[in-house]
Structure formats: C-alpha cells, structure tokens
Image (spheres, rainbow, N blue to C red):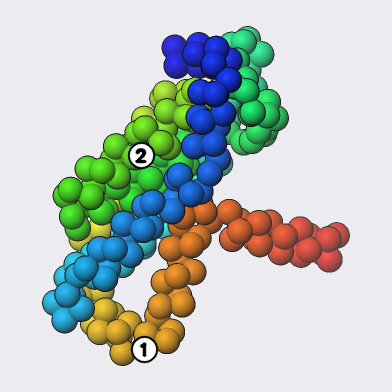
C-alpha cells in the first residue's frame, strides 16, 4: 500500500505533501504548457487555438461534473479520516485536511486528466507529459497522504477523460463556426485578461471562485434568515 511508506522518511513526506498542496507543482506547469502552445500556434490558422480554448471549456465542465458527482453520490470518508484504516499521517500534513469532504471521486483527478486529454488532442507530446504529470504529481501524492483511495483517483480520471472525449470536438467546432479566435485576436485587450483569469483559476483549482460563491451564499443566507 502506498500510504504504508508514509512516516518512514520525513524528507520524502515533506516533498510529497508539498507536491500535493502546491499550485506551482500542480496547476501552473499545465497552464504554462497551455500558454506555450497558444503562442506557438499560428493565429491565422485558428484550429490549434480553437482546440486550446476548448481545453479550457472542458476543464470548467469537468470540474463541475466532478463536484456534482461528489455531492450526489454516497458520501465516502477519506482514508485519512477513517479510524478503522489506521492511515499514517505524513510529516508536514494535517489530519483534519478536507474533513467533511467526500473522497469520491477525486476532483483533482477529474480536472487534471481532463486537461491532459485535451492537450493530447492538441499536441500529443505535451499531452503524454501531462498524463505523466497527472499520475505522478497529482494522483500519487493524494493517495500517499491518505486523501484518496486509488479508486477515487481512477474514477475521477475516467470522468475527466470521458467528459473531454464527449464534448471537446463539439466545442471546437462551435468556436470555429462563430470565429471566436478571430474575435479574441481583434479584441485582445478584453480576451487576454479574460484568458489570464480563466487559466489562473484553472491552475488554482478554482479555489478563489469557490470561496467567493461560498461567501455570497453565506451573506444571502444571513440576509434571508
């Protein structure tokens, strides 16, 4: 069992926990690939950029489907919070992390395997690298630290890959029909700040957007009760 190694070597624990929690290790490299491919593509051709925009649309859809699945499927305690499993808490990790959040499916796996699949459909070499990243940097640290069962990761990956394969090409065709890339190029002073915002949110797992929604919901609830 991967978690059986936790606590054996403190240095390894700290590296794994850092990889698990750091957006610099998780989302930033993926968005660097996205931006690199965006500027490497021919803005006059459009097809690659349309597919890259489709990747972002897929990412937003996939994370929504993943969260909806977690909220509607039966609740499942994370291994870290199941006393019967006696999971080892790695050095540098907190036992109360994500307490009360269902472990099934892994929304990290949903998002990053969706992104890897989308990028693969744009550029196979970078797509393969991002699949490796999703497995080694995203998935294994979350199992190692007791946040997920392997099945949570596998099911999340299947959701991410499945959502991408179902909607990716349809979105790309819609973007092509409506000349969205040309519009984005024409109004770069609007489109580039918007793309920066979306890629920032994607790199950070939409955490600040979730915080905003929870804040607004809390205010609305306080006003109406």
Q: Quadrant of residue 198?
A: bottom left
In depth, the one of 31 and 78 nearer the eye is: 31
Which residue is labeled 1 in the image? 187
Question: Vertically, is 89 above or below 101?
Answer: above
User: What residue is drawn where x is 27% and y is 53%?
Assistant: 118
Residue 154 image label? none
Q: Which residue is situated farthest in the bottom direction here?
A: 186
Quarter of the image with the C terminus is: bottom right
Quadrant for the N terminus, please. top left
The secondary structure type at the circle numbered 2 is helix
Crowd rating for badge 1 (residues with CA inside 10 Å; few <14, some 14–19, many 20+) = few
Residues under labels 1 and 2: Cα distance?
Answer: 34 Å
Position of 25 compared to 39: left or right? right
Q: Position of residue 142 (x, y in %)?
A: 49, 30
Q: Residue furthest left?
A: 45
In percent of width and height, residue 152 lies at 44, 29
For disc 2, the marked residue is 134
Q: Is residue 2 visible?
A: yes
Quadrant of residue 186 within the rendered picture: bottom left
Residue at 41%, 25% (x, y): give it.
151
Q: Give how far across and how far down residue 86 sits, in percent.
A: 62, 10
Disc nearer the start of the sequence (1/2):
2
- The residue nearer to you, when weighing 164 against 88, is 88
Closer-to-camera residue (179/202): 202
Local packing at callout 2 (Cα closer than 10 Å; few below 14, some 14-19, many 20+) is many
């Amino acid at each position: 069992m991967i978690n059986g190694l936790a606590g054996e070597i403190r240095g390894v624990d700290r590296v794994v926990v850092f990889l698990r929690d750091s957006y610099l290790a998780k989302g930033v490299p993926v968005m660097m690939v996205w931006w690199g491919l965006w500027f490497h593509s021919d803005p006059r051709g459009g097809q690659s950029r349309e597919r890259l925009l489709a990747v972002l649309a897929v990412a937003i859809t996939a994370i929504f489907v993943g969260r909806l699945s977690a909220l509607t499927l039966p609740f499942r305690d994370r291994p870290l919070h199941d006393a019967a499993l006696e999971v080892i808490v790695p050095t540098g990790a907190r036992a109360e992390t994500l307490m009360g959040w269902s472990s099934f499916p892994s929304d990290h796996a949903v998002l990053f395997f969706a992104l890897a699949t989308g990028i693969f459909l744009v550029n196979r070499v970078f797509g393969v690298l991002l699949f490796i990243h999703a497995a080694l940097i995203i998935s294994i640290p979350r199992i190692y630290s007791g946040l997920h069962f392997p099945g949570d990761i596998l099911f999340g990956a299947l959701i991410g890959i499945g959502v991408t394969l179902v909607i990716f090409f349809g979105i790309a065709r819609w973007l092509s029909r409506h000349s969205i890339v040309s519009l984005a190029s024409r109004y770069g002073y609007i489109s580039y700040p918007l793309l920066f915002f979306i890629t920032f949110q994607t790199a950070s797992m939409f955490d600040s957007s979730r915080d905003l929604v929870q804040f607004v919901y809390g205010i609305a609830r306080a006003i109406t009760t």
